Amino acid sequence: MIFLTATKGCKDPIEQWDYIKVVNTTTKTIYASAGIRRYGMSSYPDTLLPADKPSLLIVRPNDYNNLATSIGWEVAIKDNDPDSLSIYVFDADTINKYSWEKIRPDNIV
């Protein structure tokens, strides 16, 4: 099971960061990415993967990691049309076994 929570954090006193905490309660490593156009990923309803492999956040088994944005998730989501956010989750075995050229057209998410 994978849980997502959104929080505000502070990297330093000058920069504010918003986080989406991705909690992986499975026994497998996963990768995650936010569907935000400005970060190179599509968002609902267009869930096609980009031509170039995006930066992916690793989340190890029974651990968590944070998807972070310095512009704020509310701003990032409003930039999408419609105002929505897709979170892409990939099995690490898939990322390690197949090339992005295979993952993308077969939409192995």
Image: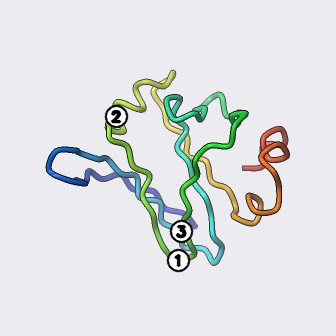
- Local SS, label 3: strand
Please state the horizontal and vertical placement of residue 16, each as a whole percent of the image: 23, 45
Q: Around disc 3, counting alpha carbons within 10 Å, would you say few (fewer than 14), some (14 to 19), or many (20 or more)?
A: many
In the rendered image, which residue does mark 1 sit on? 62
Image point (42%, 58%), residue name: 66
Could you say which disc has been placed on residue 74 in the image? 2
Q: Residue lying furthest left in this view?
A: 13
The residue lying toward the viewer, choosing from 59 and 52, is 52
Image point (44%, 52%), residue name: 67
- Local SS, label 2: helix
Please state the horizontal and vertical placement of residue 71, each as a whole percent of the image: 32, 35
| Residue type indicated by callout 1 | Asn
Residue at mark 1 to residue at mark 3: CA–CA distance: 5 Å
Q: Around disc 1, counting alpha carbons within 10 Å, would you say few (fewer than 14), some (14 to 19), or many (20 or more)?
A: some
- Quarter of image, res 58: bottom right
Whether residue 57 is situated above or below residue 26 in the rendered picture: above
Could you say which disc has been placed on residue 24 in the image? 3
Q: Around disc 2, counting alpha carbons within 10 Å, would you say few (fewer than 14), some (14 to 19), or many (20 or more)?
A: few
Whether residue 2 is situated above or below residue 89 in the rendered picture: below
Whether residue 83 is situated above or below residue 103 in the rendered picture: above
Q: Earlier in the sequence, mark 1 or mark 2?
A: 1
Please state the horizontal and vertical placement of residue 20, each as a whole percent of the image: 40, 52
